[in-house]
């Protein structure tokens, strides 16, 4: 009898059909075979007493820097950090060197990931002004989650800033377009607001209108062509209010950083380690993002994991790079917010499991259901941890949440039916596979 299951999770509170239920989960290979009472004595049992068992957490925005900047991160180290943080699947970004902006580079990245990534994965295809002919060929490309468009400059050299080129990209693609939405003309115009050595000027330089102008433009184009777009890391109350009225063609996400840190405090405390694009902003924007979370207006949470080495972060602003690590902390930080009553567990599962699958069309993930893939995140909701730089598996070796105390912590990560992380230890190397859409 016991051989029917490769692993049985017993005695846990499992998130099934939108609520926590005391039940067992029987896994067979990489699938969920049974959700219900399993009367078996087997050595292949994970005792989840006093634990919560969730669908595998998905992080829809990470930069793992391979190829090009593997001193800061690579596919192995980034995905190791992911499973340590309870993340079972992720979408990785194309602004590498060279960029993932043609099918040859895309295939190279898939090959580089094979048997090296601890989590499941998909990759974005980078849009350029000159590759729109390739965007219509992505429908059945293995491991492709969509197209990434940088409307404003950030790390790397992928930039599509002219309205005619943005229009070409959005109208050409048969996949969802995810957009870094900042207006490049405004970025250039406002460089005079940069104060050398003062990172507090970062949100002055890349101001609200810089974000809002771009977001208005991309939404208008998406509606004109009736195409689906996804606006990444939304940071302003103005964008939230605007996007709430344009949900037919548009979904959007924000980050745990923008829901946890705000100006000027974050720059006082962290200096250039708080620098990211779009910037961390004042408390009025933070407050409005939380209203949008509570009212189910935000669709997705992504970490925008973008590690840089301390040697570069320690330079004098604005010579410092924008970005911070987050894939290992996104889930603990957000579970802490659940425990403090800022959002419900159901809302978090919508934002990090169900909605990513619905919006991007990920197959067989996001739910604890018979026949679905056996990706699970196991949480001790009462475990208190002080996050430390020393815990971070990312090659950058730091986190903006150093010394931040969280209640609720992932204690088990199951990827494709295999327990890969237990109590902060990687048990088995690289079991990740490309996501299917």
Image: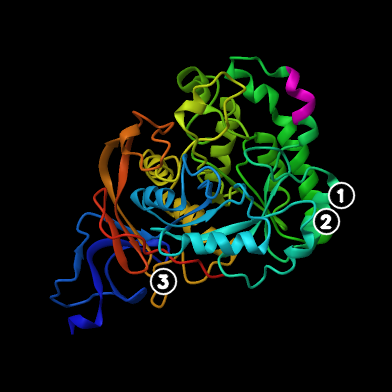
Quarter of the view holding residue 41: bottom left
Q: Which mark is residue 164?
A: 1
Q: Where is mark 2, residue-wise? A: 168
Residue 238, percent from left and from top: 70, 35
Q: Where is mark 3, residue-wise? A: 373
Q: Is residue 134 above or below residue 297?
A: below
Helix, strand or loop status at disc 3: loop
Identify the residue at horizontal 66%, vertical 41% (top origin).
240
Residue 124, percent from left and from top: 61, 57
Residue 405, percent from left and from top: 32, 32
Residue 344, percent from left and from top: 43, 48
Q: Whole-Å distance between the Cαs marked 1 and 3? A: 41 Å
| The stretch drawn in magenta includes residue 190 | yes
Q: Is residue 283 above or below residue 72?
A: above
Q: Nearer the viewer, residue 75 or 188?
A: 75
Q: Which mark is residue 93?
A: none
Mark 1 or mark 3, earlier in chain? 1
Name the quarter where the N terminus is drawn: bottom left
Q: Is residue 83 found left or right of 174 in the rendered image?
A: left
Quarter of the view holding residue 420: bottom left
Q: Residue furthest right?
A: 164
């Amino acid at each position: 009898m016991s051989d029917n299951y490769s692993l049985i999770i017993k005695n846990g509170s499992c998130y099934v059909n939108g609520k926590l239920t005391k039940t067992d989960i029987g896994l067979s290979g990489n699938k969920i075979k049974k959700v219900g009472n399993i009367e078996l004595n087997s050595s292949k049992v994970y005792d989840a007493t006093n634990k919560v068992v969730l669908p595998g957490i998905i992080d829809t925005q990470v930069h793992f820097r391979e190829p090009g900047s593997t001193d800061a991160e690579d596919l192995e180290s980034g995905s190791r950090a992911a499973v340590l943080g309870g993340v079972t699947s992720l979408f990785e970004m194309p602004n590498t060197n060279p960029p993932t902006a043609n099918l040859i580079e895309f295939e190279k990245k898939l090959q580089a990931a094979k048997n090296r990534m601890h989590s499941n994965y998909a990759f974005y295809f980078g849009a350029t002004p000159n590759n729109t002919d390739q965007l219509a060929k992505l429908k059945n490309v293995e491991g492709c989650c969509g197209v990434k468009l940088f409307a404003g400059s950030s790390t790397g050299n992928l930039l599509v800033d002219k309205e005619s080129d943005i229009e070409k990209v959005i109208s050409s693609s048969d996949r969802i377009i995810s957009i870094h939405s900042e207006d490049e003309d405004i970025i250039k115009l406002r460089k005079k607001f940069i104060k050398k050595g003062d990172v507090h000027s970062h949100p002055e330089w890349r101001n609200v209108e810089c974000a809002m102008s771009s977001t208005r433009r991309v939404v208008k184009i998406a509606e004109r062509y009736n195409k689906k777009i996804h606006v990444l890391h939304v940071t302003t109350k103005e964008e939230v209010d605007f996007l709430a009225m344009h949900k037919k063609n548009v979904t959007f996400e924000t980050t745990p950083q923008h829901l946890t840190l705000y100006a000027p405090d974050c720059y006082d405390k962290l200096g250039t380690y708080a620098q990211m694009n779009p910037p961390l902003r004042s408390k009025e924007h933070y407050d409005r993002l939380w209203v949008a979370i509570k009212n189910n207006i935000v669709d997705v949470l992504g970490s925008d994991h973008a590690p840089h080495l301390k040697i570069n972060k320690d330079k004098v602003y604005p010579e410092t790079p924008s970005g911070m690590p987050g894939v290992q902390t996104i889930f603990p930080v957000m579970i802490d917010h659940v425990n403090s009553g800022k959002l419900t567990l159901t809302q978090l599962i919508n934002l990090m499991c169900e909605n990513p699958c619905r919006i991007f069309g990920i197959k067989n993930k996001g739910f604890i259901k018979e026949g679905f893939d056996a990706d699970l995140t196991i949480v001790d909701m009462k475990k208190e941890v002080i996050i430390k730089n020393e815990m971070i598996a990312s090659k950058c070796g730091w986190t903006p949440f150093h010394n931040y105390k969280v209640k609720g912590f992932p204690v088990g990560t199951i990827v494709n039916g295999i327990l890969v992380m237990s109590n902060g230890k990687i048990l088995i190397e690289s079991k990740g596979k490309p996501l299917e859409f």
